[in-house]
Every structure is written in structure tokens, then in C-alpha cells.
Image (cartoon, grey):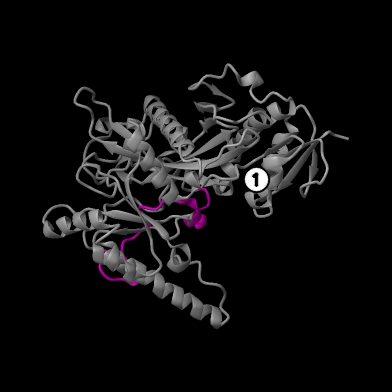
Amino acid sequence: MSCYTAFISWPSAPLTESLVRKALLSLPSPFEAVSSPPQTFRKLLQWATYDDINHELTHASEHPVLSSSYIIRKALIRKHFLARCIHSYLVKHEAPMLRAAVPRTWDLEISFADELDDMWADDLWDLAQEMNSVEQGRGRRGKWWILKPGMADRGMGIRLFDSKEALVRIFEGFEEEEEEDEGWESEGKGEGRDDDTAVVTSQLRHFVIQVIPQYNLEYVSTPLLLDPYQVLLNGSTSRPFDKLQGHKFHLRAYCVAHGALKVYLYTRILALFSSKPYSVPEESSCNGGRGGSTVDLAPHLTNTSLQTHRGEEGVRLFDELMGCHILSCPNGGSTIDDDEEDRPVLTAMHLLKIQDQMADVLAETFKAALETPVHFQPLPNAFELYGIDFLVSHGPASPLLSEPNFQVKLLEINAEPAIELTGPRLTWILEDLFVAMGKVCVEPFVRDTPSGSHESWQVGETRHFLRKCLDSEVRGAGGW
């Protein structure tokens, strides 16, 4: 009988459970797998969903316990907490890479649309002034802001707006849809509908409004644009140059935090594309319409959970995009007026520079979280997998260099990321990720060497496709 017990429980994520079991089989010491936290054990690994983990055992067991989640980590995974955390950090530190990677943010607590009346003169005063200045200068190119629920995921509740009136209509629209959904329930037609991205404001309450100052535009109108169909998949034919269409995408990077505290970036990064070619939102196009917005979100939202009908059609490895033509223009838009030989392509050096930025931003973000101990408390006997979403903006080339200027933008951090949406074609990268987590996080626990073989692993070095971004020692953190 094994002296190591592994509690494994992923009731709503069968793929994750299978990956965990395969990772444990790759380790030199066998585990006895159980379906509920045991009462007695010599060494216990809890590799399970957050809600099923016995956090009391993690925090105060008399026997060695290793768990796959920190207990307190709201500073990272709640958008409004993350915004406050980073703002506080940037007040005290230079951190130029992080400063360039995060949008200016307002966070608000709101249940009903009419509460905005008072907020314009208080919490949202700065935002109101900016919007007023835009209203007074309608002749120039408009500014756009993005609204995100602080605690929702998978693209729910995200809206674009270009005026105070449009923001009011968005919240009024959420209220209308909530009332309609309640009507559906009373008629026995199920709990709500799954055909839109509406949210219940009276239940969520916390929202963030974000802007990214970029070339006089507030909503990022110069994302790096590529055409995913330029990559050959499953015998498909590459789209000819004159038919290419620039699609917006975001990068989904997997990050492993271990102990108190080491942070690793998994270097096999995904690119998740929008379902429609990118187009700049039209000024005042959000006037009227259900939900306060007639802006088509399909060219802007890249969440795979909103495109399940496409399967893995919009999912690529970032490395697969090397050699694709860059279809974005630094001054906005995605027109292709030049010849194929004049249009730049994405190179290996571009990919490496973008990865370098991601690693730096991750390190600074976790440093910011460490300075918010009320909302982030790393434990020496825990590890956790996060899905980090980045956008890559495309700016004008440097005066000294002809190379495109790319800048990563941190969008959000997700606990228990929806890895099943990666699709079967790229499941192998997930298998390697979980095996790497087993080697880096679980094997030292088995061998009673929390640092041991990884003492010489330097920041910036990559092993098992994990690039170490941060190696910090939290005061008071001990061994197992």
C-alpha cells in the first residue's frame, strides 16, 4: 500500500481529472487515489477543484499536506481586486513594464442603473470629465471604454460604450433582461437563456471600467491582427494574401504558482481568435438597442467559451503563427493596401520579445499581490494553475528600428481555467503542462525537498517548458 494519498476531484472537469491522473502516473512514487479527503493519512496530496479541497487540512494539518490551490487569492482572480492591487503597487514602485501593461481602471459597485447619477459626481468624476470632453469634440475620432463584471468570466457582461448615456443604457438593459429571464422561469422555460452575455447586476454588483491610452484612442483600436486561416491545419488550404482578414486575438498563457513563492510561465502559449474580422467600433453606434448597445461584439471578444460552436477553429499555438503576415496598422484599422512582400510577418524574435514581456508582467503582478496580504496569501504547501489572458497591441515602429512595436496588455487572471475549450488537437500541450506541474510541484513534496533539486533554477531559465518568472521568499513561510 502506498504511503502517499491523492485526493482527486473534478466533478465538472473530466479532462482536468484525467490530466491529473496521468501526471501522477509519471512520478516515481505511486499514489493511492481517493475520491474524498481521508481522515487518516501519512502524506496527502489534494489535487482537486477549489470547492472540494479541505482547506483546513492545508492550513493546519499535523501531517504533510500539499494542495492544488491557495486559500486566499482574490487579489489576482477578481478583476476589481486586481485593479486595486496593481494601482496600489504602482503608486509605490516604478515597474515600467507593468505600468505599460495595465489599463487605467475605475471600479464601481452598482446594483441599478440609476445609481450612476451620483457616481458621475463622485467615484466616476474623472471618467465623466473625459466623456464630456469627447462629447464636446465630436469632430475628432471617438474614444471607447470597456465594461467588465469584476467576478464574471467567459466574456459575460462585457460591453463597449462611448458615452455616459450609453453606459446608463447598458445597465438598464441588464435590468430588462433580468426581468425577462424571471418571466421565462415563471413560465417554466428554464433558468434564463444562453443566447447572450447579459449578467444580473444586482447580484454581481462589482464592475470595472477600463481604458488603454493608445494613440488618442481609449479602447485598444490597434491590437495585433493576424489571420488564423493562414496556418495550415488538418490538410486545409492556406488563404491567399489578397484574401487575408485581420482577426483580433488574445494570448492564453498558463501560469503555475508554487509555494511561497515561485511563479512559472508555461511557454506553450495559445492564441484565441475572434470569430469575425476586426473592425474599429463606430462612434455613437451604441445609441439605442437592447442592452444599451448595438456594437457587434464578435470582432472584439475572443473568449472560446462564447464560440463553442466553432470548436477549435479559432485556437492556435502562438508558435504556429510565426510567418503569418501582420495585418494591423499602427494608426488603427486592418486594411491591406501594400504588396505581399512589403507586409511584415511575425518572426521568432517577435514571439520571444512578447514572451519576455509576459514574463516580466507576471512577475510584477505577483509582487503586487504579495503586497496585498489580506487578499493574497501564498502557502508553502500549495500550488495553483492560472490562466492569464494578454492582448498584444501594435504600435508604430521605433524611430531607430524598422521592427513593429508590440506591447502586451494584461487582461485578467483566471483560477481553474477552462482548459477543455483548448480542443483535442492541442490536448498534448495540456498533458505536458500537468506532467511538468507534477515534476515541479508534487515530486519535491514526495521527496521531502521543497526546494532541493530546483535550487539552481534561475529566474528566466526554462525547464519542462516552464519559464521561471519570480523566485521570492515570503516572510514566515516554512517547509511542508
Q: Quadrant of the N terminus?
A: top right
User: Residue 372's spot in the image, x, y percent?
Assistant: 46, 41
Which residue extends farthest front? 476
Q: Residue at x 21, y 42 (%)?
A: 215
- The residue positioned farthest toward the top in the image shown: 456
Residue 307 visible in image: no
Q: Residue at x 22, y 27 (%)?
A: 398
Q: Quadrant of residue 135?
A: bottom left
Number of marks drawn: 1
- Report x, y in % for residue 478: 64, 29
Specify the farthest residue to the right.
Answer: 1
Left or right, 455 with respect to 202, comes to right
Q: Closest to the observer: 117 or 184?
A: 117
Within 10 angstroms of label 1, few (less than 14), some, or many (20 or more) residues?
many
Q: Is residue 226 magenta?
A: no
Q: Is residue 259 above or below residue 454?
A: below
Residue at image coords 28%, 31%: 405
Q: Is residue 325 left or right of residue 433?
A: left
Residue that protrudes farthest toward the bottom in the picture: 187
Q: Residue 263's x, y, as percent?
A: 53, 31
Q: Position of residue 191 (x, y in %)?
A: 55, 72
- Magenta range: 285-312
Q: Identity of the amino acid at label 1?
A: Thr
Question: Element under label 1?
Answer: helix
Q: Is residue 273 left or right of residue 215?
A: right
325 or 350, which lies in front?
A: 350
Residue that appears at 22% across and 53% down: 143
User: Which residue, given by chain and number where applicable, does mark 1 sit on?
Assistant: 16
